[in-house]
Amino acid sequence: MKVIEGNLVDIDNREFYPCTITVSDGKILSIERNSNSYNHYICPGFIDAHVHIESSMLMPSEFSKLVIPNGTVGVVSDPHEIANVLGVEGVKMMIKNGEETPLKIFWGIPSCVPATPLDKPGNIITAEDTEILAKTGQFTMLAEVMNIPGVLNGEPEVIAKLDIAKKYALRIDGHAPELRGDTLSAYIAHGIETDHESSELEEAEEKISKGMQIMIREGSAAKNYDALKSLIATRTDNVMFCTDDSHADDLLIKGHINYLVKKAVSDGFGIFDILQVACINPVHFYHLDVGTLHVGDKADFIILEDLESLDIHATYINGVEVYRKGGKIEISDSKIPCLNLFNHDIIKDIDIRTDVEGDIHCIKVVPDSIITERMMLHFDRRIENYQSDVDSDILKIVYLNRYYNTKPQVGFISGIGIKHGAFASSISHDSHNIIAVGCTDTDIVTAVNEVIKLKGGLVVNDSEKLHALPLPVGGIMSDRSGQEVAEQYMELNKLLSKMGTPLNSPFMTLSFMALIVIPTLKIGEKGIFDFDKFDFI
């Protein structure tokens, strides 16, 4: 039996009061008001309503070491990224590793592996696989349904997965960027319940009015908090916080869901509205086995030093103090299986040689967004072996399937901003093929070949030297600690900043340039992809 005292944050009744909490066998036995005076507060823990743990470049056990000190007690995770690389085997690997951490991880069944029939990942997850996974009872939802044409056109495989989710009473997560009007209504009619891709307030309001729950996202690349924050006050019952994709450095330095909570407090929103969004709504919507500070609940809560700084003094999960400020999280280190799939041969400059003439589509990066814009380049005459126009910020972008020995796809991109060299990555959503941007073909090819030699990683070629963060687990995750990965990643970002990029998270931005289910222009298996036409140009 354990006794914890402090000021209770009673979100349901919108009040604070001094109390004594008795915990036994991991549950709250009693909550008794008292007349003592305390400076600290006992609050339900934070929940990330939608995250791809793999995007941190860490295994779940290491990811948890970064988020638990930030007051996170649970996450709703879609192992979509590793599924694209390793299929069901990758999903099982994540779940097994996640069992080694006290963090409560609630898993989704990846619904779109591949994201569309136009992608070529390392593995697929079929409707048959989906049913096998659903039968285990290990899953909370069918994860984000991003194949919008497949839903609207009634593609049998897509509909079968939706029917399986309904059969096993799983929540169904959506992925509906810029979807509006009758098309949105038709998408929702298939039982799809959430969206984390809204980038405009009016868009989010329409989705809520039609029955969706909206996730206010603040990740390393996609940041929608500023656009949607008013919903915290006006649609408190219908919104949740999520990070979606956050790299290890942001988790280490900025924080996790607590970062969103602090932003909302700073913006003047009511503390109880904020905490309902951060702590309560995901638990109720997904029916999570997470306590919310009621008698009989699991003893999952955090101790806040005060309600101004919102600094985390301690984190409790199932009645166990798993973190105390100044201490370390005790999670036994396990041997991480470095499962992987990397089959492409090295490439040569001639493989990405490009001649241009006339009108050429160019991807235009939007800072702090995974949405891109359309830009047209015009060449009055034929230019052979065109590589870049650094002064005009027109660089070459290359996509290379790492699972099959196919030829590279080449396009052009504006907004990356580097003045020399190149950088390449085997993290490219969603199939995680190799993607690279650079100023010369030689720089690009050198960076790409280093990724191939490493069998996965992030590489910066500053034209003089190669700098790398190896990612041996599926080519998207490290087998090292969160601290090590964050430090190495920050060094790579510093190099890219010195090379001229204005982007806050250039590798994360680069990783989304292959995500063809997000507007407007991207690059994929057959070159530049036009989201509006949903086909390659």
Image: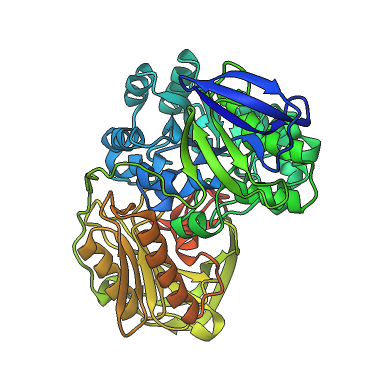
**Farthest residue, direction top:** 167
Lateral position of residue 192 relative to residue 407, left or right: right
Residue 515 percent coordinates (x, y): 47, 51
Q: Residue at x 45, y 43 (%)?
A: 52
Q: In this view, does 77 lie to the left or right of 34?
A: left
Residue 324 x, y percent position in the rendering: 50, 45
Residue nearest the observer in this picture, 481 or 163: 481
* Corner quadrant of residue 6: top right
Q: In which quarter of the image is residue 121?
A: top left
Report the front residue among 294 and 100: 294
Confirm whether residue 264 shows in the render: yes
Q: Is any part of residue 182 visible from this angle?
A: no
Residue lying at 71% horizontally and 39% vertically, measured from the top left: 38
In this rendering, the answer to whether 528 lies above or below 129 is below
* Residue 90 or residue 319, whichever sits in front: 319
Work out which residue is located at the far front of the displayed protein and give it: 36
Horizontally, residue 348 falls left or right of residue 135, namely left
Residue 448 screen position, x and y as percent:
29, 68
Above or below, 329 against 451 in this view is above
Q: How is the image coloured?
A: rainbow
Considering depth in this image, is 9 or 113 the residue closer to the camera? Answer: 9
Instruction: Please name the residue shown 56% across and 66% down the image.
Output: 364
Tally of numbered discs: 0
Residue 149 percent coordinates (x, y): 52, 36
Compared with 112, 529 (above or below) is below
Asked where in the image residue 100 lies, by quadrant, the reply is top left
